[in-house]
Amino acid sequence: MFTKLADQFANHFDRFDVFNLHPRQLQGFLEVLWESWRKNPNKTVPIAPHPGIGKLDGTKPITPVNSMLLSLDDEILSNGGTKIERETLRDLVIDILDENNQGNPAPDRFWPHLIYAYLVENTRVFDICQRLLHQIVSSEQLGSMSEASQRWARTTEMLFFRDGSASLIGSTASELRPDVRATRRNAYYRMFGMDLNHGTLDQRPYAYEKPKAANRDFVTTFESFLREVWRGYINSTNSAGVNMTDTAAIADLGSQLREMLLERRHNGNLTREEFSFVATMNWFHLTLGTGPDDEHNSPIVRDCKAEASSPDERLRRLGERVGVPAHRKARSLLTMAEPLSNILVMTERGDFDDPGEVGALYDSSLETGQAMLEIINHWSIATGHDIKATSVTSTGSA
């Protein structure tokens, strides 16, 4: 989502120029992704068309990319910073859509799985950035902020700390659901049977509705799936002895996970919420940077003197500056967020239902196998559940 846009910016400008875009333009970008998915014939969940989608002048269709760019000036970075012409932004967005359709492991989606939002939020990046933003707009406790950081603060507040227009796809707050944090926890619990590992900023338990219809067996089933895949990997590296790989068990567990996750998605349930929550956490993930180089320290990280060689260390230092401790396993949570998202998207699609197809999960020469090894290692670290040990029953949250 925002990181994909940043990757496209990096090919022409600075990746953090994304933070210079006007909030209205970033909201338009999300609308482009949603509408492009909604009109994609390969999507797995049917979504009814929005009544506002139609013709601009009775003859000219409003395409998603065009709708984002309507009424914008030719030079569109109205928050300040480097100027980018309208046609350039159009090309960048089209490149993102083409990349999703051709190279993404799940071409019927334009955003990560809900597990991505859960893992990123579990690092406490949202709470830390909320406290950081509050100090920026209400005091000078953190020192003088650069223009770039002021633009980040303005855009972050506009996008994620104000009730959005009901017509925008990212808006989930209403009189019925006034607390978006509680709404996110409700979605995590429904889909995964897990809560976040932290409560309120004053360390009280966070109140939210836990419905009866929830996948409370997700963790147990998923960890069994990981253990069977690990067994397959161990046996694939042994040149002698009995091969204990149980491809039927892997496929059965994959099918259980698929049915469990899709049960929560009937008729588009949680789809809009997932889109909104993933976009939110992706923005804050991008704020932390995604690489080890100095160039991956965003302006706000630099101004807060939180520069570091990894996103988790930047988060830890930001947390220290504002008095909100980051999750001590933030490194593992951030590392497995994207690969686990991809694996669950593939699982929901039914890629691992056939015993003859599950070998990719433990073949370390393949991208899928490499992702699974990374997930197994970091899930064990983050949860304290040793996936490589003898199978045990476990529940809880990362």
Image (spheres, rainbow, N blue to C red):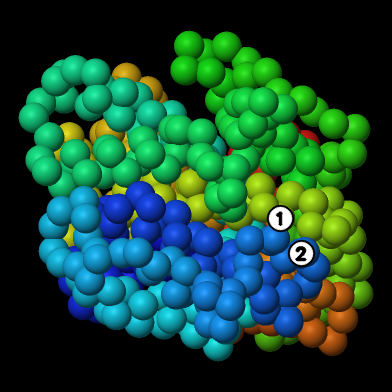
- Residue 66 shows which numbered tag? none
Question: In the picture provided, is 140 more to the left or to the right than 395?
Answer: left
Closest to the observer, 385 or 77 = 77
**Residue type at the position of mark 2:** Ile
Where is mark 2, residue-wise? 47
| Residue 164 place in picture, x, y as percent | 51, 40
Regarding mark 2 in the picture, which secondary structure is present there? loop
Q: Are marks 1 and 2 in contact (CB under 8 Å)?
A: yes
Task: Give the position of the C terminus as an image quadrant.
Answer: top right
Where is mark 1, residue-wise? 271
For discs 1 and 2, the disc positioned in front in the rendered view: 2
Q: Is residue 9 visible?
A: yes
**In the depicted structure, whether residue 315 falls above or below residue 90:** above
Tag count: 2
Q: Which residue is located at x 44 percent, y 75 percent?
A: 66
| Residue 342 place in picture, x, y as percent | 61, 67
Neighbor class of circle 1 (other Cα within 10 Å; few <14, some 14-19, many 20+) is some
Closest to the observer, 113 or 380 = 113
Q: Which residue is located at x 76 percent, y 46 percent?
A: 191
Question: In the picture provided, is 1 more to the left or to the right than 363?
Answer: left
